[in-house]
Structures are given as C-alpha cells and as structure tokens.
Image (cartoon, rainbow, N blue to C red):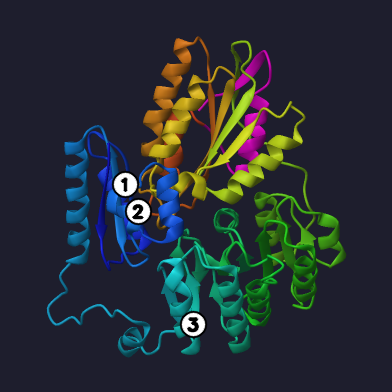
Amino acid sequence: MVRCLVRRDTYRDSVELMRVAAAVEQRPGVTRAALLMGTPPNRELLAGAGLLEGEAGGAGPNDLVVAVAAVDKTTAETALAEAARLLVEQLATPAAAGERPQPRTIAAALIDLPEANLAIISTPGLYATAEALKALKRGLHVFLFSDNVPIADEIELKRLARKKGLLVMGPDCGTAILDGVPLGFANAVRRGPIGLVGASGTGLQQVSCLIDRLGEGVSQVIGVGGHDLDERVGGAMMLEAIERLAADPGTRVIVLVSKPPAAVVARHVLDVARSSGKPVVVNFLGGDPAAIRAAGAIPAQTLEDTARLAVAMSRGRKAAPGAPRAARARIKPVRRAAGQRWIRGLFSGGTLCQEAALILSARKAGGGHTAIDLGDDEYTVGRPHPMIDFRLRNEHIIAAAKDPATAVVLLDVVLGYGAHSDPAGALIPAIAEARKVAAKGKRIISFVASVCGTAADPQGLAKQEKALRAAGVALAPSNAQAARLALSLAGDGLAKEASP
C-alpha cells in the first residue's frame, strides 16, 4: 500500500529529509519511505521505485513529496502523519533568547557573518545554480552539495569561479576539509603538509585517514565534484585547487585522486601539476601510470599506496610504488560447500567499490565476483545514503547469504562526520543472520571488511574494529588489502577462513 503527501511550496535540506525518511522507515509495517522535492527527475525516480501515487504525480519543483509504502492503508497514513510531525519538529526548534532568526538568503547571512568566505549550498539542483552564482558574485567560495545540476550550469559556475579566483566544490560534492574544518562526509584527521584534491568523496576519505594513521596530516582536502574532469568541464576546479596548493606554504606534497579523466583533461591537469614545483602523487583509479610518470608525477595504484607515497614524500624520503600488500590475518582451514567460489562486495563508497572491483577483476576467476555501490542513485531513491542508514546493505547481506555461490562478503565501513553513529552495531545483526541462513544450507560464509576512519572520529576507530572482530569479521587496514584478503579466502575447495 503506497500513500503520498505533497506539501506545496515547502523546501527542506536533503540531509534533513534523509533523516526523517530513516526515522519513518523504522516504524512497524513500513517497508519504504521517501522524502524528495518534486522535481521531474525525483518524480521519475519515485515512479521507478513504485512510490509515486495520487497528487504526487503533479508535484512541482517547489513542492515536497512524502511517499510511504506500508503493509496496509492505516499504517501508511499513520507513517505520513509521523513524517509531517517530524518535519514540523525540526523546523520549530526555538531560538535562544535574544538570538537572531536563521537567515534565509545569502545576503542576510552575510549581514550576520560579514567575514564569511564560503557558502555551503544544498538546494534542489534546479535552484542550486542561482544560489551559487549569488555566492560567487559576492566573492564566496562554494561547497555545492546539491546534485542534478545541469552540466552547462556547472561549466558556467566554474568559469566564473576561475575568473574570480574562487573554488566551486561540486556539484554533488560530499567531502572537503578546509583549514581543518570538515564539510559533508569527512573524518577527524590531523593537520599536516599534504594537500589533497579529488573528484571522489570516499577516495579522499580513505587517503586522508590512511595518512593520519601513518602519523602525518593534511593541509587541505578539496573535493571538486564527480564531473569536474569531464572534457566539457575541463578540470576547472582541479586546476584551481592545484594552483592554490602550489601557492600554499603549508602544503609540501600534492595528491590527486580521481577516476581516469578525459585524455585532454588529464594532460592539462598533469601539466599544471608539474609546474607546481612540489611533489605530486596521482591516483587516476585504473588509469595508465605511464602518462603520470611521464609528466613528472608519482603514480599510485591504490588509495593505500597513494597515502604511503604522499607521506614518504612529505618526509623527504625517496618514494616508489611498492608491491601490493596483503592483509595479515590469522587463518584456519574451513571446508566450503561445492560451488562456493564468489565474492560479493557491498559498498557504501563509490570509489572504494571501484577500487575493489579493479582488484577482484585482476584475478582471472570467470567473472563471478561482484562489487555493488549501494550509494549509487539506482539504490538510493527514496532512501538515505548507506553511510547513514544500513538497512539496504543489510538486506543485500542476507540476500548474498541465500546465494549458494557466495563464499565471501566484502564490506567497507566508513566512519566520520555525517556517517552512522555506530556502523558496526548496525551491521552485526545482519552478519549474524546471514551466518544462520548459510548454515541452514550447510555453508560457511566469510566476512571481510576495512574500516575507513581515525581514532578521533566520533564513532571511534578502535571501538568499531573491536566490535567487528568480535562478530567474526576479518579486518584489513585498507580497502585494497580487504579486497586481496577476500580473494585469498574465496579459493575453491579447502579455503582459508580468517579468525577474528
């Protein structure tokens, strides 16, 4: 039973909407809950998920759509009422005595905070460009969390930013750390001499966390959005960021992280990196290291290698790509059932998923290993991101356990600001249930994970790792090592099982 509620001329931040959706989905009898602005792309996504009903089909971009799927009409309508209550509750947080009301425009915000030099924008993509233009024209850098921004608008914004010497981080930028201040999904990492630029949120998180674990820190972490290295955009903000880090006396080493750019963009980016006068470590994930080396930069094959090379260079040591590292785990023999051969990778981070997929595909195993990015739009329609809400991933864990071909389930666990407050606690019940499901079929499934985080993160790295080990999860210190460990555990016949 699907029911929808439309609030006309009502806007809420996407993070707020995700939290309300997560709370509503936890109600008994509710199977799905979605809160989205009524833009045409969002309505299309709702329709594809079977959540578009009644007046929601005529919702406009200024309207908020609340959609609920439940076991019956009464449960659905009660859930809609709860969503409406939570929206009002969040809006009605009283201001302290004498406190000014929250500004509703950039101009009003600058009256309250005239020294501001950055605007964080999280509006529907249809309106994000107009707000970003206002910020740029007032001399503000922009952190653009909004997605669904047309590529032509992104080009316009970034051309203006380059002209004015400003940064536009995004659209769809989820991670940055500027002068030690985390924005979006980011980790509590120490300050230091390594500057990071990336078109990859979890890639930046993984590299910055591994740098922290190696005892070094970051000067800046600048996300540029996933389309920046598209040939049409031309790497505008990666170029701006490299130039800024080149001029920054607090940055000794520059790191670039991205999927392989368009060839013409890669050449331009590497030329500017060469002219920075500083050591540059480059990871164009899955790209050709020869072109990077020819440009005088240092190629890295994995995110872990990227961090290690950057730290070595920051300490004045000779840096060279090392051999692939395998996680050290105590192992014991375990007899798997016939046909248990494949790894099922279930990821919340797109770059972590891609890195694992590259490693898994490097082994000629018949193409049966899979790696799924559950944070992709295909999976997140009407749902909070899997770094916030683990229910979708838990469903996939149980489904993997029901597959008689599954030998290993490979996971990423991302800590930090904006992420779930207890990822291990959210995963462990599903892992226990998956073991029971497999046992009924006289099968044993191994679980392998890496935890992307630091000791200073709100969730606590040691606490999360301890809980996962106690649940029988084999842990690796990096995403790449976790993928290699999964391969070693997925052998035919007498496999090896990592012990906690």
Q: Amino acid at mark 1?
A: Glu
Query: In 3D space, how far apart are the residues under numbered discs 3 and 1 (Cα atoms)?
Result: 35 Å
Query: In 3D space, how far apart are the residues under numbered discs 3 and 2 (Cα atoms)?
Result: 31 Å
Residue 200: x and y in percent read: 59, 58
Helix or strand or loop: what does disc 1 sit on?
loop
* Residue identifier under label 2: 57
Q: Is residue 436 above or below residue 289?
A: above
Which residue is more in the foreground, 147 or 179? 147
* Residue identifier under label 1: 53
Would you call the spot at circle 1 few (<14 residues within 10 Å), some (14-19), or many (20 or more)? some
Residue 401: x and y in percent read: 49, 22
Within the magenta stretch, is there residue 233? no
Q: Amino acid at mark 3?
A: Leu
Residue depicted at 44% across the width and 23% down the height: 434
The answer to whether 87 appears left or right of 318 in the picture is: left
Region rendered in magenta: 474-500
Helix or strand or loop: what does disc 3 sit on?
helix
Which residue is more in the foreground, 22 or 80? 80
Q: Is residue 463 above or below residue 236?
A: above
Q: Is residue 160 visible?
A: yes
Q: Amino acid at mark 2?
A: Gly
* Residue identifier under label 3: 133
